[in-house]
Amino acid sequence: QVQLVESGGGNVQAGGSLRLSCAASGRTFSTYIMGWFRQAPGKEREFVARINWSGGSTSYADSVKGRFTISLDTAKDTVYLQMNSLKFEDTAVYYCHSVLYGAQEYWGQGTQVTVSS
């Protein structure tokens, strides 16, 4: 089992920045990938960014490339999402996501990000 706890969401004006954190606990030694998804009201959950736990390679949705940066601190079992130049359309609940070797998936409870225009 893996437990994921997000923090760092909040309200920000367009053009501002926020940093989300996701602290993992449990079977983190089996982590393959960690990432972030988001879900806006009335929309499906969508991929935002992911990072390979061992090699650090990253991938981003086109909508956030150049504005968001995902990083990790393996010593703290924590993944971060630095969000800059935020737009109204970035408003959503952001979920931390973990995939283990063996394909088990885990989700955090979500943290709200609200960008006012």
Image (cartoon, rainbow, N blue to C red):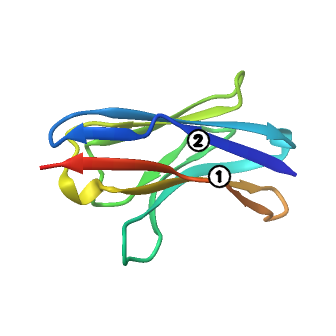
Q: What is the number of callouts on the image? A: 2
Helix, strand or loop under label 2: strand
Q: Position of residue 109 (x, y in %)?
A: 62, 53
Tell me: 27 left or right of 94. Answer: right
Mark 1: which amino acid?
Gly
Number of the label disc, if any, that sits on residue 95:
none
Q: Earlier in the sequence, mark 2 or mark 1?
A: 2
Nearer the observer, 54 or 115: 115
- Report the residue at 70% width, 23% height from top: 76
| Whether residue 24 is situated above or below residue 110 in the rendered picture | above
- In the displayed structure, 105 sits above or below 13; it is below
Q: CA distance from mark 2 to mark 1?
A: 6 Å
Please state if 73 lies on the left or on the right of 14 as rendered. Answer: right
* Image coordinates for residue 23, horizontal then vertical, percent: 67, 35
Q: Position of residue 20 (x, y in %)?
A: 47, 37
**Classed neighbour count for the residue bearing mark 2: other residues with Cα under 10 Å, few (<14), some (14–19), many (≥20):** many
- In percent of the image, x 69 and y 38: which residue is there? 54
Q: Is residue 46 above or below residue 61?
A: below
Give the residue type at disc 2: Glu
The residue to which callout 2 is attached is 6
> How packed is label 1: few (under 14 Cα within 10 Å), some, or many (20 or more)?
some
Residue 66's place in the image compared with 88, above or below, is: above
Name which residue lies at 70% across and 45% down.
Answer: 4
Q: Does the residue at mark 2 contact the one at mark 1 (Cβ under 8 Å)?
A: yes
**Which of the pair 11/6 is nearer the observer?**
11
Residues 65 and 106: in front is 106
Q: Residue furthest left?
A: 117
Q: Which label number is shown at residue 108?
A: 1
Q: Secondary structure at mark 1?
A: loop
Residue 99, image x, y percentages: 72, 57
Give the residue drawn at x 79%, y 65%: 103
